Structure formats: structure tokens, C-alpha cells
Amino acid sequence: MAKKNKVIRPKARVPRGLRDVRAHEVRAMEYMLGQIRQVYDSYGFEPLETSAFEYSDALGKFLPDDDRPNEGVFSFQDDDDQWVSLRYDLTAPLARFVAENYDGLPKPFRRYQTGPVWRNEKPGPGRFRQFMQFDADTVGAPAPVADAEIAMMAADCLDRLGIARGQYIVRVNNRKILDGVLEKIGIFGNDPEVELQRLTVLRAIDKLDRLGPDGVRQLLRAGRKDVTGDFTKGAGLNDEAAQRILTFTEVTGSNRLNVLANLNDVVGDSSTGQEGIAERAGMHELLEAAGFEDDQIAFDTSVVRGLGYYTGPVMEAELTFETEGEEGGVGRFGSVGGGGRYDGLVQRFKGIEIPATGFSIGVSRLYTALEHLGALSTQETAAPVIVLVMDRDRLADYQRMTTQLRQAEIRAELYVGASGMRAQMKYADRRGAPCVVIVGEDEFAAGTATVKDLVEGAELSQHIEDNVEWRSGRPAQQTVSRDGLVACVKEIVSRHRAK
């Protein structure tokens, strides 16, 4: 007897570090993005969509020096032997777009964009290889007015989404002030080793919230070993230089002006540092004129952002309410977005410095925060009314009824499966339908329709113990004329929506 060949089927699984998003989250996300979009529109920004793929050499900062550019980004070689990568953020594609279309764009060019980005990094809890960002950027405008507007928009977005004053803060710093401190300890110039040391310092400070001053001090000096034994090489500073940087991050004040005054002692006579202080003073004047108070937008010297391309103001939007962390501890929810000024990014293409500033919202993280606060409940979409199919020879009649419901702005679905009455009812229950429309042979003959209120029926069934009583009573079920069908369904849907 011939041996049967074993059928090998692929295993149904989502790739590691990726996830599927179901209907309720998609709808909630659309609601949230719509609110943000309205804020960006109100500031005069225009939408833009760029390709998910870019030539790898246009992306720049994540690419290593080896033959296959696959560290940090997902890449492949095209049929013309050029490397192409999935975008890792929305800023690099914007820089390419501006450079490519520079002569025909209004300047300043103000755009917003939302969409998925991809990182070829090790996934972990809450850390995915594909995630959404929502950016707004101004290209071609010098500081401080454009930077102030970006900070204002970030605060307005959080306000618009129902996050109360006191539950969020937009924290603003300026890289030039930190550069002034670094100049004082001998870190300046364009030498590659100096740039690497500077970036190590930036990344160390960026971990201040997570590691605390002692952990950052280790990263500023020789390095730090974590609880798993992994060692991160430090910036190699001596103790005095490390302390000077930590002192800078600890400069505080009761308000924005007070912070600026206290920074003078740390920066001293550094022209770069003083330029950064002057830019922040200009931002404060604009923020005050627009009515943004210190509990909405604050100056915070611990904000540096870990990316090397920022050249001036940097900012983070932080949610300050307490939540339980992954390891059970309680702390602030933390950052949901960040950005700043990056005057050199378009220069990679054009050869001339073009000022730019922007802000990126981490959509998934902000969604989690709004879900925690219960601020997404207002956008729920009602489940559809289901028109059951009792006689398949009369599908056109059922379709006509379904269309009449839709024309009355009732979300309605014609059952398109092949199952019988019992399975159709189970389907309607599983869809969460408020009611079903039942038209069989008797109803067609009489010109009527039976409407069963599934929500009320479920509530009444809890008080009916006898099956005979259930069948004879037919709770929450009524028969109406075909002309009265729309009004009957609309009343049921409205009643349950109001609950």
C-alpha cells in the first residue's frame, strides 16, 4: 500500500515582536489620532504621507559599517543592487522629501504625518518591532518661535485628549546649554572620538529617570554593569567632570524664569551655553504670551534626548499620574512623546544648513495611557443590527431592508453566511448586536417584520426560569409593519446607546 505523503502546513503565528490589532483598538486609535489631527490642523500644519521604504543611505544614523545594513533597520537589496530599508521613524523620510522638493515647497514647510515605523531591535514587554508615530515638524524656521509652537501643540494635544492639568507636563531643555557645560570639561569639536564621547554622555543622561544619579554617574565614568551582568561602557570622564554634568541636570527652579537664572552659574561664560539660555528665554516669552503656564510647559535640564542629531531645544511630553510598572512598583507613567530642533538633518542632502524642529508622539504608549485614564470610552462604535436570512430565495428583499436601515444612518449588516436560524442568532450575540430583524414566510405574507431586542431579551431572560414561559412570552420581541421597521429599530438602537 502506497504511503500517504504528510501534508506540511504553516504554523499560524504572528512574527516575533509584531502584533495584530483588533477592531476595538483600531477604532479607539482612530478616535485618538483624529483628536491630535484636529490640533495640528488648527496650527496650520498640512498632512503628508511618505513611502514606508527609503534608500538605506538616506536613513543615516542607524546603519552600521558593514556589507548588509540590517542593524537597527529591516533592509533588502533591490533588483538594481541598491539597499532599501523600512523607515525607522518619520523624520528621516521628511528630510529626504524636503531636500527632494525643496524649490517647490512653501518655506517654512509645516507638515504632520502618522504611520507605522519599524525597528530591527530585540523585542520585549511593551516593545514592538512595528509601532505607530504621529509627528509634526516645521522645516525652514529658526528658533525660538517654531520650537515654542511645537511645545504648545504637544500640550494642546494632551489637553484635547482629556488628560487633565496636573496629569501631564511638557519638559523643555536646550542642547546648546549642555554643550556649554561639555565645553567647560573639554568635550568639544568635530573629532569622531569626541562625538562618540558626547553621544555617550547624552545617552547616559537620558537614562536618569530609570537609573538615578548613581547609575548615570557610572555611565559618565568607566561604565555600568546591570543586574544581569551585562556591562555598558561609559564616557570615561573623571569624577569632577561627571559631577559637573550631574549638577547641570539638577538645576531647578520654581518657574521657567527661575530655572534660566540658575543656569547662568553652571554655564558660566560659554558662548554656546549662553546662546541656549537666550533661546529658552525667547521661548518663555512666547509661551507666556500664549497663556501656557509652568504646570503645562516647564524648563527641565534633565531632558536631553538620546539621539545625536538634535542641535537646540529638546522636549518630552510626560504623563505624571502614577501607574503600576511591569515589575509591580508604582511610579509615573512617563514619556509619551518627544522631539526638538535638528538643523543639520536636511543638510545631509542639500549641503546647506536648513533649520527644522518637530515633535513625535508615541501612539501606542499614549493609547495605553488614555485607556488607563478611561479617556477612550466616548468613541465606542455601536455594534450592527443583523438582518437574518430565513428564505434564501428572497435575498434581494433582505438586502432592500438592510439598505433602508443604512439610509436611516443605522449600522446594519445582512447575514451573508450559510447557517440556519440558531447559528445566525448565535452570530448576532457574538457580534454584540442590539437587535435582529427576522422576516420569514409568515412575515412576508403579512407585510410585517419581527424585531428582537437582544439586549433587553438577555436582561429579561435572567428572570425567566421556565422554558415554556420563555417560548410563550417571547421577551423583548415585537412585530411591526414593514413601513415601521426603520422607526422600531432606530428606537431600540437609540435607547441602548443612551444607557
Image (cartoon, helix red, strand yellow):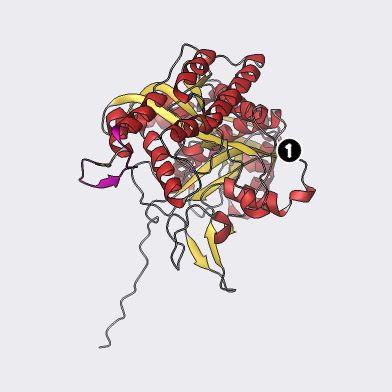
Residues drawn in magenta: 224-239
Within the magenta stretch, is there residue 188? Answer: no
Residue found at x 60% / y 31%: 36
Residue found at x 32% / y 30%: 240
* Residue under numbered circle 1: 108
**Most common secondary structure along the magenta stretch:** loop
**Left-right relation of 148 to 166:** right
> Can residue 14 be seen from the camera position used here?
yes
Q: Nearer the viewer, residue 52 or 97?
A: 97
Residue 74 location in percent, x, y? Answer: 47, 59
Residue 48 location in percent, x, y? Answer: 68, 45
Q: Nearer the viewer, residue 166 or 284?
A: 284
Q: Nearer the viewer, residue 161 or 77?
A: 77
Crowding around mark 1 (Cα neighbors within 10 Å: few <14, some 14 to 19, many 20+) is: some
The residue type indicated by label 1 comes to Pro
Question: Which of the 4 image quarters holds residue 373?
Answer: top left
Q: Say which quadrant the N terminus sits in.
A: bottom left
